[in-house]
Amino acid sequence: MIGLISATAAGASARDRLAAAWPDRTRVYEGPVPEAVRAAFAECEHLVCFLATGATVRLLAPLLASKAADPGVVCVDEGGRFAVSLVGGHGGGANELAREVGELLGAEPVVTTATDAVGLAGLDTLGLPCEGAVAAVSRALLDGEPVALAAELAWPLPPLPVSPQGSYTIRLTDRDVRPGDREALLRPPSLVVGVGASRGAPVEEVLGLIERTLREAGLSPRSVAELATVDAKSREPGILGAAGRLGVPVVTYSAEELAAVEVPNPSAAPLAAVGTPSVAEAAALFGGGELLVPKRKSDAVPAMATCAVVRRAGRGRLAVVGLGPGARDLLTPRATAELRRASVLVGLDQYVDQIRDLLRPGTRVLESGLGAEEERARTAVEEARRGHAVALIGSGDAGVYAMASPALAEASDDIDVIGVPGVTAALAAAAILGAPLGHDHVSISLSDLHTPWEVIERRVRAAAEADLVVTFYNPRSRGRDWQLPKALGILAEHRAPTTPVGVVRNASRPDGSSRLATLAGLDPASVDMMTVVTVGNTATRTVAGRMVTPRGYRWQSGRAEEIR
Ligand code: SAH
């Protein structure tokens, strides 16, 4: 819950905008400000104070206890120009909240905690438990001192500015090792504990078995991702209780699914009880992985619990990210987040240049020149399969005449794929031209490098006959100059010579331009590869210099009548 406190009318109006936008996340504290701050501080995880920082600091000072427990506090100034992360930047989430509040109110987020301010992911913000010399290692990263990454297993980490050797170390490990003075441990959720339990097995017995098993195998409980068992045990109190105490979810599989998993130690007892020869081993091994500890029983007599431990490989992550047509403010926040989340970036050099300033230090950039499409796609998939977090970028939408399809044609199901849509050239151009896409429309690429011209021509003809608005991508290049006139000629067989045609070059880029022509009047020589050409349908009109395709037709007594 976010507590909202304000003192003035301007503050109250900004406060109300926040409350209206996030009705379920916010609570307004009215009344005298000092009491409101005290109450919100005690009751909420976050505070947004529409107060001067000085006043807020004085009110908060006596309440502050510790970085770990205090709420994150954001101050918004009277003019609504800044959202200042005041207390609890990392742990309290105030940095993130300042960004969110800033976005909502149109205020600039102000973040001063070191790691965030230089665009570095603080070790404690990676979403993995960390322990050991976390502050010292974060400081070393910031000061540019060499920090080495000792990754004992592949995991899709965000970028970290690490060097091959260093006097400080970040160790990614699920082993129960003691960190050195200059070492921080990151705990990947790589362990799955398969659990079997007889009805009524006590929590203490299940939990004791799991803890002892991990200890004796030299494994950290902080790396346990989940407890896995059979559906029939999904409500077994001993298992649920143990999971609750470990802070992990319980995942269950049907007896049939488990029976199909090959295990080293099948037995008759579970087969009779729940219909699978193995519960603990089979459930742990279900998603694949390495069996670190085969089935073992608790010491109780009779033993009521079994467990087995599997190490699962980290799944690589491939984000296919559309950068939009060019302008920074047409790049979506989600695309930005994925670019900063990836430790490996793959793309065409000119697109990389477009977003290089957004990348975090430590991002490995694999850029290549025009033409190397298939190789780029393959590289991105290979890197993800090695367990990295990869972003594969493309202009506009990365799925439109771009990298998504060659990449996914190569990808196997052992990686996660995240698609981030982008504003494609047809939409960027349409917004400049007016409303040319108000009714059914298609995009057609006139590049016959990978598609035979006969196929392209057939599609243009079909679009012409179906009276679809058509946007041509890749309309014309130095070596390909006859295709556009030919395509326009086919459309002209079904549309008037006066049909509006919009030509947009470098939409949303600094040297962008656009103009309106007609089907008969367009000079194809004025079109190049940085351009899209949108041809209206038979209903498209030019209104006040803008291209408008009516939304539809009203059918009355069987007759189509255009709505104007
Ligand atoms: N994935 C891109 C398209 C790649 S094909 C997208 O979704 O937009 C390349 C073609 O897209 C270019 O030849 C041009 O026709 C068009 N294009 C891309 N960006 C453009 C822009 N900013 N303005 C006009 N056309 C653009």
Image (cartoon, rainbow, N blue to C red):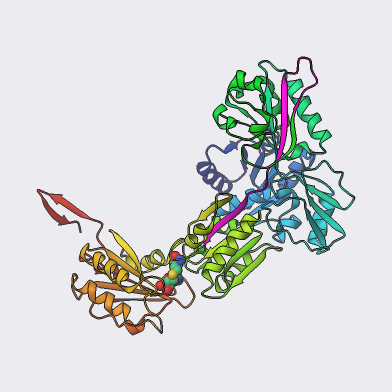
Picture coordinates of residue 153 (x, y %)?
A: 73, 50
Which quadrant is the N terminus positioned in?
top right
Depth check: give the residue in front, 347 or 524. 347
Which quadrant is the C terminus positioned in?
bottom left
* Residue found farthest to the right: 181
Q: Which residue occupies 47% across, 78% down?
A: 511
Depth check: give the residue in front, 236 or 43. 236
Q: Quadrant of ligand 1?
A: bottom left
Q: Is residue 143 left or right of residue 18?
A: right
Depth check: give the residue in front, 204 or 297. 297
Q: Is residue 9 left or right of residue 245?
A: left
Q: Which residue occupies 72% across, 35% down?
A: 309
Q: Which residues are magenta?
A: 296-322
* Residue found farthest to the left: 557
Number of numbered discs visible in the structure rendering: 0
Q: Is residue 305 above or below residue 14?
A: above
Can you see residue 107? no
Can you see residue 225? yes
Depth check: give the residue in front, 384 or 324. 384
Picture coordinates of residue 96 (x, y %)?
A: 64, 50
Q: Is residue 231 left or right of residue 395?
A: right
Picture coordinates of residue 49 (x, y %)?
A: 65, 45
Q: Is residue 191 magenta?
A: no
Q: Is residue 306 magenta?
A: yes
Q: Is residue 343 above or below residue 51?
A: below
Q: Is residue 178 left or right of residue 356?
A: right
Q: Quadrant of residue 18?
A: top right
Picture coordinates of residue 326 (x, y %)?
A: 50, 69
